[in-house]
Image (cartoon, rainbow, N blue to C red):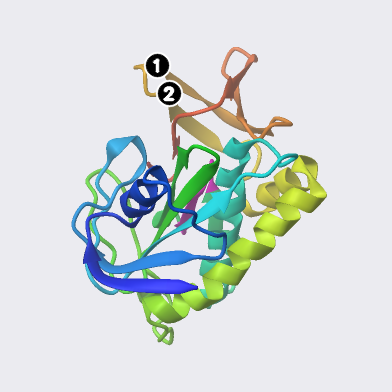
Amino acid sequence: MIETVATTGSTNADLVARLRAGESIPEGYWLRAETQTGGKGRSGRTWISPPGNLYTSTVINLREGDPPPQTLALVIGLAVYDQVDQSLMISDQRDVMLKWPNDVLVRGAKVAGILLERCGDAIVAGIGINIAFAPQIEGRATTCITALNMKYDADPEHALSFLAPKVAEQLARWRADGLAALISRWSRAAHPVGSPLSVNTGDGTMFNGTFAGLDEGGALRLRLDNGTTQTIHAGEVSLIAEGNG
């Protein structure tokens, strides 16, 4: 089910508030806003939300036996990657990639982002995809689908009708196949091993190194200049070569 509202502060904040008020929200329900006045990105950033782009959130109800909830970042990232990849007409598909944990980049520019928030035994997954506009963000390259594929004519609601089943498929595979299969799928879509990365862990610590893959739990492994490997469980990653945040 997809519910669309003309405007709201944040679709994520709306679903979190409803869950905290005791409402039971089933998986497969999506809340979409044509525009947001208080859209949120990771680390408290504002997600600029003009009309024409996709702003939506859904709920994943955690079940006994599910893989670790933090790995849902990889799950949702893969679904959005598939959506973006299939919306473009780019001869070299390596131009579309995931940046850990779940940003989607096209030729080094950010086209989509994801925010996960936990509320009890549920995860609210917020997704923003630049369809018609690429908001300007200081220090970050951005792009939109219509700038990359002038023949793309799907509006945000139509785009969500394709994205929702991709999320459902990735969730089913996450539950059925386990983490090793998930990490393998994510790695094929991501920046290659050896990519120069810069990581800000959020506490003032910065690491520079090269991507050494993911560990068995989905954390980023960073090979430092001294030959040691640092495991990153949370942080802001930049691809140094492209200068992206």
What residue is pinned by disc 1? Answer: 205
* Residue in the foreground of this view, choosing between 205 and 44: 44
Query: Is any part of residue 184 visible from this angle?
Result: yes
Residue 65 covered by magenta stretch: no
- Residue 103 lies in the magenta-colored region: yes
Marking on residue 201: 2
Crowd rating for badge 2 (residues with CA inside 10 Å; few <14, some 14–19, many 20+): some
Q: How many marks?
A: 2
Q: Specify the quadrant of the image occupied by residue 170.
A: bottom right
Badge 1 element: loop
Q: Is residue 16 left or right of residue 214?
A: left
Q: Give me the residue at 72% from left, 48% from top.
A: 182
Q: Is label 2 in contact with label 1 (beta carbons under 8 Å)?
A: yes
Could one spot residue 90 in this view of the protein?
no
Q: Nearer the viewer, residue 142 or 45?
A: 45
- Amino acid under disc 2: Thr
Residue 30's mark? Answer: none
Q: Which region is colored magenta? A: 99-107
Decide which of 171, 64 is in the foreground and name it: 64
Residue in the image at 55% along x and 60% along y: 26
Frontmost residue, 6 versus 114: 6
* Residue 7 placement (x, y as % from top left): 22, 67
User: Considering only vertical position in the picture, is 70 above or below 27?
Assistant: above
- Say above or below: 3 vs 241: below
